[in-house]
Image (cartoon, grey):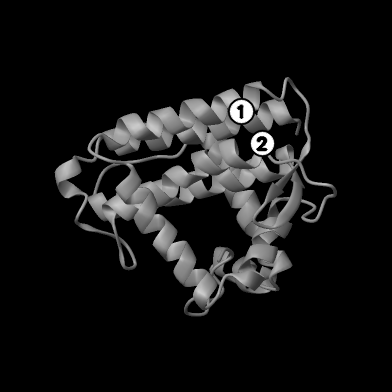
Amino acid sequence: MDLGEIRQTFTAAATAFLDLAERVPVERYAEPGLGTWDLRALIGHTGRSLVTVTTYLQIRAAQVDAEDAADYFARVSRTVHGSARDAVHQRGIEAGVALGDDPVASLREARDEAEMALDLLEGADPVVETAAGGMRVSDYLPTRTFELTVHSLDIARATGLDFTPPAEALADTLALAGASALRLGLGVDVLLALTGRRPLPPGTSVVP
């Protein structure tokens, strides 16, 4: 799949997230979101999938370190623990606070800036610096589609709102989850769960 198609799927996932976020009243932001995050922190963390596109696309890397999106999650999973996990949690809280009094406007601005950063590539697919090291934009962008899709489902579950991810975003997210499971040695567990043979072990996740 070329960068143009990958971008279209990312844009669809971003639009779906923004449409969902618009349906969450600010008055509910203090309600439980995911884990110890409230809804404001969860929505703010999800919005970081837009912010990091803008940030990372400005920083060129000297080499490719993560060969694809599944490798990205495998590499991040090996580093996100202890104090690093606490830092991720804190960044979510800070991102929620940064949304301010008009969260949807802030999120739409972040989406527009991400799209502008992609426009500036003019079809090129450079190697950029990410949390997992150097990556092609075409390999990094699916990780953002994944985050937007999964966390939109988290938001919908926390709020009770109806939400169906765009078909192409859901398909790519499922494929990436399977590929990530293989990289993490969970391929057999996931396959047996998907075919109704046995449930996943408690706490199993294909992402950090």
Q: Earlier in the sequence, mark 1 or mark 2?
A: 2
Which corner quadrant of the image does residue 103 belong to?
A: top left
Viewer-side label of 1, 2: 2
- In the displayed structure, 85 sits above or below 1; it is below
Amino acid tagged 1 = Ala
- In the displayed structure, 206 sits above or below 116; it is below
Residue 59 or residue 2, whichever sits in front: 59
SS of the residue under disc 2: loop
**Residue 157 appears in the picture as rendered:** no
Q: How far apart, in angstroms, are the residues tagged by discs 1 and 2? A: 8 Å
Crowdedness of circle 1 by 10 Å Cα count: few (<14), some, many (20+)? some
Residue annotated with mark 2 = 58
The label number, if any, that marks residue 117 in the structure image: 1
State the residue lying farthest toward the right.
Answer: 63
Tell whether 154 sits left or right of 124.
Answer: left
The quarter in which the N terminus is drawn is top right
The quarter in which the C terminus is drawn is bottom right
**Residue 4 appears in the picture as rendered:** yes
Q: Position of residue 195 (x, y in %)?
A: 58, 65
Which corner quadrant of the image does residue 92 belong to?
A: bottom left
Crowdedness of circle 2 by 10 Å Cα count: few (<14), some, many (20+)? some
CB atoms of marks 1 and 2 within 8 Å: yes
Amino acid tagged 2 = Gln
- In the displayed structure, 202 sits above or below 92; it is below
Which corner quadrant of the image does residue 24 belong to?
A: top left
Residue 192 or residue 184, whichever sits in front: 184
Q: Position of residue 106 (x, y in %)?
A: 35, 33
